Image (cartoon, helix red, strand yellow):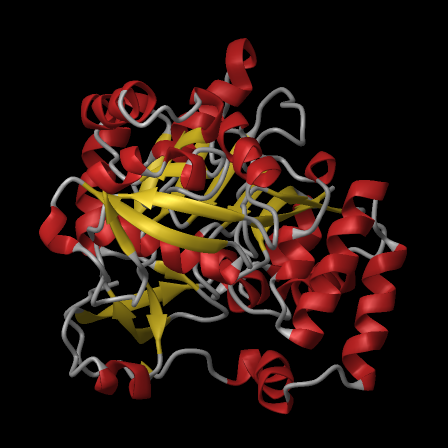
Amino acid sequence: MSTSDKKQRIEYGSDKAGDKQQELREAGNMDANFLEMARNVYAHLNDEISKKIFEAKILYASTGDVGYITGIEPKYRNLNSDMQVYVEKLQKGSHCLIYGTGAAAHYLAGRFKRFGVKVDAFVDQDESKCPVDEATGIKVISEKELCENKSLYGDKTFIISYSVKPVADEVKKRLVEDAGISEKNIRSGIFDWRNNQGQYFDFFEAKENEVFVDCGCYDGATCFNFAGWCGAKGFDHIYSFEADPKNYEKSKAVLEPLGKCDLYPYGTADVNKKVYFAADAFETSCIISKEAAEKRNFEGVTEIETVALDEVLAGKKITFIKMDIEGAEYEALLGARKLIVENRPRMAISVYHKYEDFVTLANLVLEMHPDYRISFRHYGFDELETIMYVE
């Protein structure tokens, strides 16, 4: 297929294949059909963890309150140790101070606000930044002021916003030695709010002769994680799809040493077509509508081809499908219906890009195989990074 074929039609994001989801989004409520689908999915959930996550996502979907997700007990979330600290220290209603006043500090303050965590102040060496941060309206205190008011701030949680470790270590040293802040109250900022080490591969156990389909390859890391998951058993083959042109070129070089891996420069959808695509050269690259492209004045927008897995991989043996494609999962699953029916692969599917995904995607795979069992695991601090495991 040629990406230069301008005669092929341009689809503006999701088309008729996604009408069911679009209607739910536009309705903005839990209608009877959605609730019936939800009951069907709930009946197929595999364990207590999945039920807890599902219940929290139902409440979030119906109210928009992210607290239902952040309030899930830590034991029901697959978090790494650093994120676990945040869960324990920064519960809703807690207070903290952020060291730094740059972009990272503003980012952290925005995230904390959504979680119901109060940022009492920024701390900065530069006294000219005081007394108020213009971008956020949050109070700014100098290190000198902090040292002079140890009793006022000493028992608060401090978040260091610098991501460069030597710089963060130096700040921590000054907070401890000069300001008298206890080490147990000092944390470094987390800028990737998920546990992406075990994501997709910590639920299933690898079998012999695995054949992996990676929809949304990004930088190739997931393919290597798959190979590591297979371990000494090895694997038969990988079919990987990455539509972002820059990500595709990076992945091509990265995956070459892996062997037994076919990389395709396409998105995955219900049919072969062209679409508008926000090519950010990052993992957030995604199919967008004409309206969204126009709002961006077509900056960073390109045209890509999508393919149906049923066509590209027709006749192939498939054992495991992973999809993390920024909201295009519903259409991609429709385009893989024949493969799924014939092979009954295990799957790891992202179900957080659209609020209804955790119901509509699960219901769709159950239509293909009513005996599938569904499990959910949550790998993020907020509402992001919920994975549906299908077996």
Spot occupied by residue 156 in the image (x, y as percentages of width and height): 47, 39
Identify which residue is drawn at 26% across, 49% down. Answer: 141
Between 80 and 345, the one lying in front of the other is 80
Q: Position of residue 10 (x, y in %)?
A: 29, 83
Q: In percent of the image, x 21 and y 22: which residue is there?
A: 170
Residue 388 vertical position relative to residue 19 in the rendered view, above or below: above
Decide which of 228, 183 is in the foreground and name it: 183
Q: Quadrant of the C terminus?
A: top right
Seen at 79% across and 59% down, the residue is 55
Quarter holding residue 148: top left
Farthest residue toward the right? 43
Is residue 30 visible to the viewer in this orientation of the structure? yes
Judge whether 181 appears above or below 357 on screen.
above
- 128, 300: nearer the viewer: 128
Is 1 above or below relative to 51?
below
Which residue appears at 45% of the width and 71% of the height? 271
Position of residue 27 measured from the top left corner of the image (x, y, whole percent): 64, 90
Residue 222, percent across and down? Answer: 42, 35
Image quadrant occupied by the N terminus: bottom left
- Mark yes or no: residue 319 visible: no
In this rendering, the answer to whether 388 lies above or below 346 is below
In the displayed structure image, the side of residue 145 where residue 365 appears, left or right:
right
